Image (tube, helix red, strand yellow):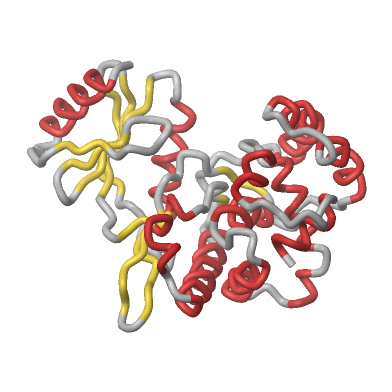
């Protein structure tokens, strides 16, 4: 549907809920998301995206008040004409991707610790009432189509021919327990605010791609889009999660495997975003370079 259609629907939905604030559409996102005044955000889903709509609604309910970082409060989730929608509270702060370049090293390290604490709390949220996935079937399907997907996204030599052998060598045991995953923890989905002499996380949002599965899967997006290929910052995330040294053995290789198997994986994009030095020519070396 057109932007005008989304705006008209948003105006009607806002009126339905007694809201009259200015509508301002956020620029990013796969579906229309609009601020409704200073207090609310409206997310619109086409009718055929019922699964994403249901996931957003269910996870917002599940995480409310359970994380050390604010998440949007859920006010309503209904259908209006050609749209499903979620009306939620508006978080406040600056997108982390907008301020990251100007942050001093100590602020980045502290924010990484906070991200780790947030992930630990997220993974402890009860999953009762959330739709469980057949994790084994999901991983098998991702594994079977991995090389073709990476080739589709223009991954070429010397990387493409390494994908299959690398995955064969990495042991991805099934998780001891499946947990709630955000799956796309990244700067663009985190808000921050000044706090004393430093910064604090002031919001986590965008739960439509959430799922239930192996907690290490969440580290795939973190390694590229949060710690940004810096192994020292990635280690601060693990510190915040309370991950002991014994659990980190082989972790970089496993997270690299999840980077390849992630349902939105595009290794070409990652390499463009975080170009390795010329001497890093293998996936094994890349895992060490980005993750330690």
Location of residue 148 in the rendering, given as x and y in whole percent from the top left corner:
77, 26
Q: Residue furthest bottom?
A: 197
Above or below for 112 versus 132: below
Q: Is residue 271 above or below residue 156?
A: below
Q: Quadrant of residue 71?
A: bottom left
The answer to whether 210 is drawn above or below residue 141 in the figure is below
Give residue 88's position: percent from left, percent from top. Answer: 28, 45
Q: Is residue 42 left or right of residue 178?
A: left
Residue 268 in sight from this viewpoint:
yes
Residue located at (7% from left, 38% from top): 20
Q: Nearer the viewer, residue 234 or 175?
A: 234
Question: Residue 82's quadrant in the figure?
Answer: top left
Where 248 falls versus 127 (above or below)? Answer: below
Q: Give me the residue at 25% from left, 50% from top.
A: 89
Q: Is residue 289 left or right of residue 79?
A: right
Q: In the rendering, at what x and y percent does residue 142 appear?
A: 74, 34
Q: In the depicted view, which residue is nearer to us: 226 or 277?
A: 277
Residue 32 as seen in the image, left or right of residue 147: left
């Amino acid at each position: 549907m057109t932007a005008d259609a989304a705006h008209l629907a948003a105006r009607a939905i806002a009126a339905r809920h007694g809201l009259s604030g200015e509508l301002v559409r956020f620029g990013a996102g796969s579906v229309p998301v609009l601020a409704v005044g200073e207090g609310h955000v409206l997310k619109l889903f086409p009718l055929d995206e019922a699964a994403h709509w249901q996931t957003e609604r269910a996870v917002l309910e599940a995480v409310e008040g359970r994380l050390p970082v604010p998440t949007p409060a859920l006010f309503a989730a209904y259908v209006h004409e050609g749209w499903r929608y979620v009306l939620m509270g508006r978080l406040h702060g600056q997108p982390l991707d907008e301020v990251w370049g100007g942050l001093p090293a100590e602020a980045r390290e502290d924010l990484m610790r906070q991200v780790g604490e947030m992930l630990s709390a997220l993974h402890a949220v009860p999953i009762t009432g959330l739709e469980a996935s057949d994790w084994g079937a999901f991983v098998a399907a991702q594994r079977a189509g991995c090389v073709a997907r990476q080739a589709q996204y223009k991954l070429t030599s010397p990387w493409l021919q390494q994908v299959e052998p690398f995955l064969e060598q990495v042991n991805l045991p099934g998780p001891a327990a499946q947990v709630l995953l955000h799956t796309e923890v990244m700067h663009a989905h985190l808000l921050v605010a000044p706090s004393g002499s430093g910064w604090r996380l002031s919001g986590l949002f965008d739960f439509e791609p959430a799922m239930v599965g192996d907690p290490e899967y969440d580290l795939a997006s973190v390694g590229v889009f949060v710690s940004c290929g810096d192994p020292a910052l990635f280690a601060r995330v693990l510190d915040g999660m309370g991950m002991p040294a014994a659990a980190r053995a082989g972790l970089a290789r496993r997270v690299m495997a999840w980077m390849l198997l992630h349902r939105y994986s595009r290794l070409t994009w990652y390499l463009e975003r975080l170009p390795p030095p010329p001497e890093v020519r293998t996936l094994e070396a890349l895992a060490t370079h980005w993750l330690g």
